[in-house]
Every structure is written in C-alpha cells, then in structure tokens.
Amino acid sequence: MSVRKGSIRHTGLAIALFAALHGTALAMPNDNDVAPAAPADANADKAKTLDSVSVIGQGEARQVQRITTEDVKILPPGTSALKVLAGKPGVHFESSDPFGNYEWSTRFSLRGFNQNRLGFTLDGIPLGDMSYGNNNGLHISRALIAENLGSAELAEGIGALGTASTSDLGGTVQFYSSDPLPKYGVQFAQGFGTDAARRTYVRLDTGNVNGFAMYISGAYSTVDKWKGDGAQEQMQFNTKATYDFGDSRIGALVTTSDRDETDYQDLSLDMLHRLGWNWDNYAPDWNRAVNAAKGIYTGGVNNPDDAYYAGRGVRKDRIASVFGDFALAEGLRLKATGYYHYDRGQGHWFTPYQASFPGTPQETPISIRTTEYGIDRAGGTAALNWDIGAHHLEAGVWYEDSNHNVQRNYYFITGPVDDRKFLENPDLRLFYQHYETTTRQFYVQDSMHFLDDRLAIDVGFKAPRTEVEARSLPGTARTYATGDLVAKKNFLPQVGASYQLGGGFEVFGSYAKNIAAFQAGVSGPLATTQVAFDTFGRSLKPEQSRTFEGGLRAVSDFYEASLALYDVKFDNRLLAISRCSGIVGCPSAYANVGSVTSRGAELALNFKLTPQLRWRNSLSYNRSRYDDDYVDGGTVVPTKDKTVVDSPKQLFFSELAWVSGPWDLRASANYTGKRYYTYVNDASVPSYWLFNASAAYDVGRLGVVQDLKLALNVTNTADKKYFGSIGTNGFIASDPQGQFATLQVGAPRAAMLTATLRF
C-alpha cells in the first residue's frame, strides 16, 4: 500500500514537535536550580512507579497483580496496556492486530467476566467498560499514550472498594500515568516495522522547579492492515503537571486522541473453509463490491455478508482532570479528582442492505451505514483518609453526569469515497437516542492492623445508585424506546483479611457483593422498540455478583509465588442475542438467563534464577457455566451447565528474560484454551500457542545523546494461524453450520525496530 500524504504530514509534525521541545532546553533550569525533593509523606500516594511495588500483591486481602517494567519490554512500543496484562493469571486478552489496539477486535476478560462487566480507571478517572460502542468512557489506548503508563493494578475478582465504576462485577484494572521526571530531559523514539508500521514518540520533562514539574508528550502511529486494504492511524498528546508543597500535592492531566482504523472483515467458520485465512473486505475493488451487492458473486463468495467494500472506526477524545492530595492534619488526608471527557465517534460500514438514491438514475446498491456516538461527561471523586491507632479509615464519594447520544444513519454515495473523516448531513436516519446517566456512589472502609502488623483486616461497604434515562429523538425511520432504568443498592459489603505466617508466607481471603448499572447506548436494553421495552423493561433486575476468594503468597530472594482459589456467583445475567448480521443492525433481544457460576484457580510463579536470568509464569484454570436454561420466543434454549461464551478453561503464560550489561533478551509463550461462541456450545474455535521475542541493546552515550537504546520486538514468532478474537459481532444461541460471522483472525508474525534517544 502506498504511503498516505496525511501520514507523512503527521510524522513531520511529530519530528517538528521534537525539535521545538528540545530547543526549549535554553530556557530550562540546570541541575543546580532544581528544588529539593518534596517530603516523603507528600510523595506516598503519587502515581506508582513500575519497579516499586509487589507484583503479586503482598499484604493485600484481595487477589491483586501489578505490572512492572518487566511486563512491558517483551512487546513493541505502543502496545495496549491490556495486552501487557495478558501475562497475569486470570487474564484473557484477544485482538486481531499485533499491538492490541484495534478496538473492534479487542476483548478482555477476567475469570469468565467480559470487559462489559469489569471496571477500569486512569488516575481515578472512570473509563467505563472500554467497549467499542462506549457510552460512558473510552479505551485505555486512547486515554493515555502507551509510553506514559506508570503502572497498573489488576484485581482479578474483587476491586478496590472506592473504584469509580458502574460495571465492576468481576474485577478492576486501575491504570496510573507516569509522573513528571525530577530532572529536565527530552526523549525521542522512532520505530519502523512490518506492514509499513511507524511510530514516533516525543516527550519533554521540565524537571522539578521549586516543587513544580511537568511533561508534554506526543505520539503518532500508523500501520497498514496485515491483510486487505487500509491502515490504522492515531495521533495523541498527553500533558501532566504536578506541584508539591509541604506534605500536599496538586496537579492536572490533559490527554487527546484522534484515531482512524480501517476494519478487518469478520469471518465465520464456513467462510474460513471457503475463502481462507487471508480473506478480507473488497476495497479497493469497487466493482466487485457492487456486483456482490447485486447478487453476482465470484471467487468462492456466496452471500452478501462474506465481505463489504470497507469498514472503519473514527474517534476523537479529549480528557481534562485536576487532582489534589492534601494533608489536613496529622494522619488526616483528603484526596480529590475532578474530570471532564469529550468524545465523538463513528463506525462506518459500506452496506449492501440500503441502496443510495433509490428509485433515481443515480441509484447505487451500496450506501455508508454509520453508528455515531457522542459523550459529554463530567464528575468527581473525593476520599477522606484518617490514620488513628491500628485503623486506617476511609470514606469517599463519586458523582458523574454523563450525556450520551447514539444514532444510526445512512449516507448515499455514487462510488468509492474517502471516509477517513467524520461524516455529516445523513440522507436517512434510522434511529436517534439521547441518554443521560447519573451516578452517585458512597463508600466507607476500615483497614485494621494487629499482631505487629502481621494480621490485616479490611471491612467496608459501598452504596451505588445509577439512573439511565433514554429519550428517542424525532425525525427517524425507527422509533426507539423512551424510558428509564435505575440500579441501586444501599449496602454492598466487602471484607477481607491477610495474615503473615512468617518465612515470607502469607494467607489471604476476601468476600464482596457488587451490582452493575444498566447499560446505556446501542448495546443496552433501552436500544429497542417502545413496545419491547414496555414488555420486559420493568421486570429487568440489575446484574449482581457475589465473590469469595482466598489463597497463599510466598516471597523469598529466589522466587515470588501466589496461589488463589475463587468461587463467583453471577445473578440476573442479561444476554444480548444477535438476530441478524451486525451490518443490518436490527435490535438485539435480551434475556435474563438466571445465574452463572465461576470457579477456578490462579497461580503466579516468578523465579530469579541468577542475577541476570529471570523466569516468570502464570497458570489459570476457570470453569464458568450457565446455571439455567432460558426461554427465547417461547423456545427453551438449553444453556444449563454449558460453558460461558469466550471463556477458555486454561490459560498459560511463561517468559524468560536475560539481562546482562547492555543486553536485554526475552522470549515468551502464551497458551489459550478452546473457546465457544454459541450459548449452547455447538460452535467453537480451537486452542492455540503464541510465541513472542525481543532483543534490546543499550548503546549508552553517543555524542550529544545521553543514551541510545535499540530494541527489536517480534510477535507471533512461529507465524501461527489462529482466531484472535471471537464475538466481534456478538454471540448467538446456536451455529451448527458455522455460518455466523463473528470471528477475527489473529495477526501473523510482525516485527518492530525502535531507537530511543534521551537528551
């Protein structure tokens, strides 16, 4: 594929940014001008650095894992933080691109809970469930430049009580941006890779100036699809500033993202057999797409859903937040964050199901079908912490008001058009809904320490209330529901304890109950007809979960280990049942299938074999099953004792790292077990192994460059053919003939060479 002029322009902007930032060195203070570091108490709750925490959650009453610098190095720069987490026990990550950033295909689950039932935050800012058609958040790959990730904390089953999330039934992931560096410096990284991949990253740190520190950073990335036509492109900017005074800190974070991704075609098992692994959409062959829309098929194609001309997602996001950590008195602190998020997004499909300019001489059998999203949300969190004797008391609140618009439109065309932009003035509007979601949550927790801190006990509860109001706007071909749904509980308890046995051993256990808010937007129960909502809407109950987990941790100079067992009951599970192919866009049916039970075990085992050689491993076994059959249109669907869709029973990860002098060599292996994509388990994709490798060499000082580092990352080194993602078009009850197109092929072998310069 030829290089687009826009790509050259953006790369030039990134290089110009680097030159401009480096030129500001004359205005920056030298090392002698840097103010002394803030007192330790003021820094105690800053964004966690990657090397400063226990990766297995030592001292926690819950099952907790953390990212370190070791987790990041095996993957190419710019890789999604979610893919980095895939090496942790209990984590199942899917994507059809090497970087894990292609959002249509990205899937993340914990213990059988998909990401729609998990909680995600960045520096305390809620990210919603990070789904593709999000109504109250955004994906971490848009919220933060990957190189600016400071750390991440993963709770596989029970999230921190104060997590700002309305969907954390099955665990949480809390991301933290990196802090400004204490010394002035400029970092510039440039990468080139397979499929014309290019990534530029620039960051300027001002250094600490009388307690004030700040960084400005930008990243531009582009990569051609590994099959078919088109590219995936993103431009991001992040700025973070902090000011330390006494034992307190205030700061601000601003992030922007503009993303354009060309879609891969979703496949079925039948399509794979007829058309092969490398099958994709028709672009740039417009004539073949037109013929297929007319029912004239060639080359093994036998229906209109085998391929479309093209598909695309465009997103624009802006986040601004201010935060503070204030020492009010001895042992008494107040933490507060306020935030605003603006999002505009469109998903494009060249559809053969709606002609352009029907009944006129211009009639064309293809139009562009869009789903258009808008989010304007603002909110804040506050927590008061009081240390008194053996108790650490914490009380907090979260409030958010989110306005979300979603509409389905058609744009008429007479031939192939460049749709790498936001489309305006549709020719036909199918539906248009406005949602207002108001969230209030309060929590209280007491963390107690006894027996010379060997025994830790956490006791607390939260009280969430989320109201979703939907209003159907006029002037549409189809009228969707107007109504409201409320999910609330006045008492959701969480208790846990850990006890140090001595010799580096520790036992822990915890219990929690949670509920999820009803989902707003195109994937929620209000995205249906008024008649349907009036029939079932008032009988809907919020999904809820009950979790028990416990285990053993052990730490020595030679190893770190964690073994956890869990039992989870998930009640009032709502299933969205696809009625047609995704491009047609008919409303899904919703069914309360009763409950789901998940039981399993997770093992993390990390060895320091020599000062240079480390070996880390994770092994997970999960059995998630539906406890009941459900009724769909008068027909009983036999789901009882069937495995939950997209929940592999076995997951394994292993990485060997050798670091000696300037060399850093790594190799890893991932195993993912069999996955079902139908509720009755009559259709599945097989298990697979993936291997990755990396080699880095630190050249050191080179002329004016303080440090030069070269890194080569290779993903899928064995060039394995496998299904990376399933459920991209949803899930259905049964597919015995393998004709439902909801699968995405994983990316083949890809390499990325990156040079990182520090000035």
Image: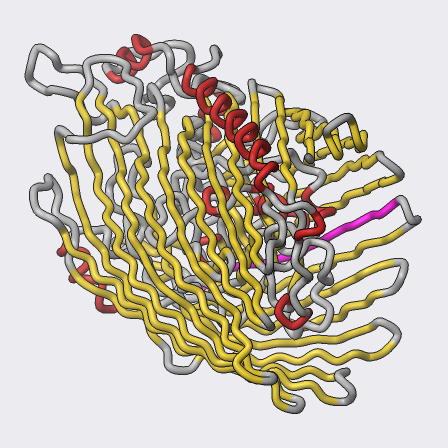
Relative to 547, 468 lies left or right? left
Q: Residue at x 17, y 62 (%)?
A: 483
Where in the figure is residue 443, as x and y percent of width and height? 45, 78
627 drawn magenta: yes
Q: Is residue 173 visible?
A: no
Relative to 573, 450 lies left or right? right
Q: Nearer the viewer, residue 86 or 74?
A: 74
Q: Residue at x 43, y 15 (%)?
A: 4
Q: Is residue 223 above or below residue 328?
A: above
Where in the figure is residue 650, as x and y percent of width and height? 66, 50
Q: Is residue 93 above or below residue 452?
A: above
| Quarter where residue 666 is shown | top right
Which of the image's four quarters has the C terminus?
top right
487 drawn magenta: no
Q: Residue at x 77, y 89 (%)?
A: 451
Relative to 161, 540 lies left or right? left
Q: Nearer the viewer, residue 48 or 653?
A: 48
| Quarter where residue 373 is shown | top left
Q: Main secondary structure of the magenta part?
A: strand
- The magenta stretch is 613-628
Which residue reaches farthest bottom? 389
Q: Residue at x 22, y 26 (%)?
A: 353
Q: Nearer the viewer, residue 118 or 304?
A: 118
Relative to 501, 272 lies left or right? left
Where in the figure is residue 735, as x and y percent of width and height? 42, 39
